[in-house]
Image (cartoon, helix red, strand yellow):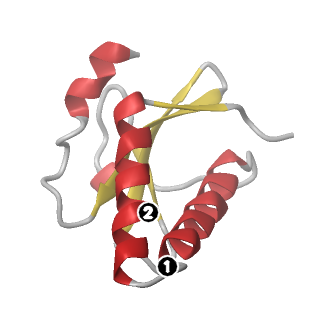
């Protein structure tokens, strides 16, 4: 049984903008990016797999991250009520934790 998931609206917008950026670089690359994100989300939702803590740090609440295979992105998420809440689709060059203010919107 997989877990349920939700996304912060700003994360959804990040994802869209990134896919469009990749598609502008090469036709179809945005689709490849979205496929890689989908595979990463599927692995996050698999209850038999545990991904690492965000930047290896303990925090409260505890953030987790999963890299997007083939792309310089991390999916940053929380585990809430048996489900997953995605805070960011963070480009690895972005300032770490830029998305932390999104917690107030949960």
Please state the horizontal and vertical placement of residue 59, each as a whole percent of the image: 29, 34
Q: Earlier in the sequence, mark 2 or mark 1?
A: 2
Q: Label 2: which residue?
A: 19
Please state the horizontal and vertical placement of residue 75, each as a whole percent of the image: 44, 53
Q: Residues within 10 Å of mark 1 (few under 14, many from 20)?
A: some
Image point 26% across, 65% down: which residue? 92
Q: Pick out the residue farthest to the bottom.
A: 26
Q: Is residue 20 above or below residue 89?
A: below
Query: Mark number for residue 29?
Result: 1
Q: Quadrant of residue 34?
A: bottom right
The one nearer the camera, 38 or 29, is 29
- Residue 14 in sight: yes
The one nearer the camera, 69 or 18, is 18
The one nearer the camera, 39 or 30, is 30
Q: Residues within 10 Å of mark 2 (few under 14, many from 20)?
A: some
Image point 36% across, 60% down: which residue? 18
Image point 73% across, 50% down: which residue? 46
The one nearer the camera, 34 or 85, is 34
Quarter of the image with the C terminus is top left
Identify the element where label 1 is drawn.
helix
Q: Quadrant of residue 38?
A: bottom right
Please state the horizontal and vertical placement of residue 71, each as a whole percent of the image: 41, 75
Q: Is residue 73 above or below residue 88?
A: below
Q: Is residue 52 above or below residue 3?
A: below
């Amino acid at each position: 049984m997989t877990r349920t998931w939700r996304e912060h609206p700003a994360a959804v917008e990040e994802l869209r903008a990134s896919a469009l950026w990749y598609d502008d670089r090469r036709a179809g690359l945005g689709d490849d990016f979205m496929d890689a994100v989908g595979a990463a989300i599927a692995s996050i939702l698999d209850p038999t797999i545990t991904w690492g803590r965000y930047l290896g740090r303990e925090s409260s609440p505890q953030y987790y991250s999963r890299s997007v295979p083939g792309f310089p992105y991390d999916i940053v998420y929380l585990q809430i009520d048996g489900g997953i809440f995605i805070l960011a689709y963070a480009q690895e060059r972005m300032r770490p934790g830029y998305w932390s203010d999104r917690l107030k919107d949960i």
